[in-house]
Image: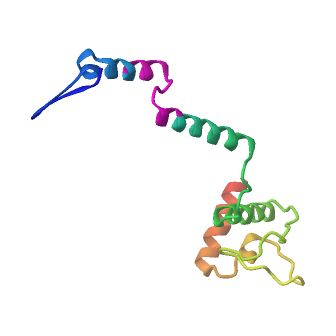
């Protein structure tokens, strides 16, 4: 049953009988696409989801993760634990102290703070310790 062409008017039996609408309703209801491109797209999405779960890409070291490591180093320093500076290659806001210098507090570790900033930081750390 093909398409009858009348000048200025097109008639389609498929559209007249509602076959296309019915196929679309079935595809939406079942989740199974009825067209070739729909099946290919669904297969591609399924394969991509499978590959994402099987092969996880290596995570890059970002500035956020570097900051997290530096905050952890500061927290260890505040708690009196030994601090490993090996992961800090290009610090975001802190500088490595010379190896001969002993660090007794966080304030010594952050030399770029002003005096007022150092006082406020010490007050804050004392409040947190209590």
Q: Position of residue 74 (x, y in %)?
A: 75, 65
**Viewer-proximal residue, 79 or 57?**
57
Q: Quadrant of residue 29?
A: top left
Q: In the image, what residue occupies the spot 48% across and 18% down?
A: 30
Q: From the viewer's perspective, is residue 15 above or below residue 122?
A: above
Q: Is residue 104 above or below residue 81?
A: below
Viewer-side residue, 59 vs 40: 40
Question: How many tags in the picture?
Answer: 0
Q: Position of residue 122 (x, y in %)?
A: 68, 68
Q: Quadrant of the N terminus?
A: top left
Q: Where are the magenta residues, as a range?
A: 25-39
Q: Is residue 29 magenta?
A: yes
Classified by dominant secondary structure, the portion drawn in magenta counts as helix
Report the front residue among 129 and 6.
6
Q: Determine the residue positioned at 73% across, 55% down.
A: 129
Residue at 71% across / 74% down in the picture?
107
Say which quarter of the image contains residue 72: bottom right
Q: Position of residue 130 (x, y in %)?
A: 71, 53
Residue 63 shown in magenta = no
Q: Quadrant of residue 16?
A: top left
Residue 124's place in the image compared with 36, above or below, is below
Image location of residue 65, percent across then percent down: 69, 61
Direction top: furthest residue: 17
Q: Is the image coloured rainbow, by chain, by secondary structure, or in one colour?
A: rainbow
Residue pictured at 80% horizontal, 61% vertical? 76
Q: Is residue 8 left or right of residue 121?
A: left
Instruction: Give the side of residue 126 with respect to residue 2, left or right.
Output: right
Q: Is residue 101 left or right of residue 16?
A: right
Extreme-left residue of the structure:
8
């Amino acid at each position: 049953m093909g398409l009858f062409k009348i000048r200025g008017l097109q008639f389609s039996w498929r559209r007249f009988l509602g076959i296309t609408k019915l196929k679309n309703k079935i595809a939406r209801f079942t989740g199974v696409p009825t067209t070739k491109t729909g099946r290919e797209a669904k297969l591609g999405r399924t394969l991509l989801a499978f590959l994402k779960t099987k092969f996880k890409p290596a995570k890059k070291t970002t500035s956020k993760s570097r900051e997290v490591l530096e905050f952890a180093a500061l927290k260890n320093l505040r708690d009196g634990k030994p601090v490993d500076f090996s992961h800090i290659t290009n610090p975001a806001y802190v500088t490595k102290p010379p190896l001969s210098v002993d660090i007794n507090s966080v304030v010594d570790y952050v030399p770029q703070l002003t005096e007022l900033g150092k006082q406020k930081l010490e007050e804050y750390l004392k409040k947190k310790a209590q």
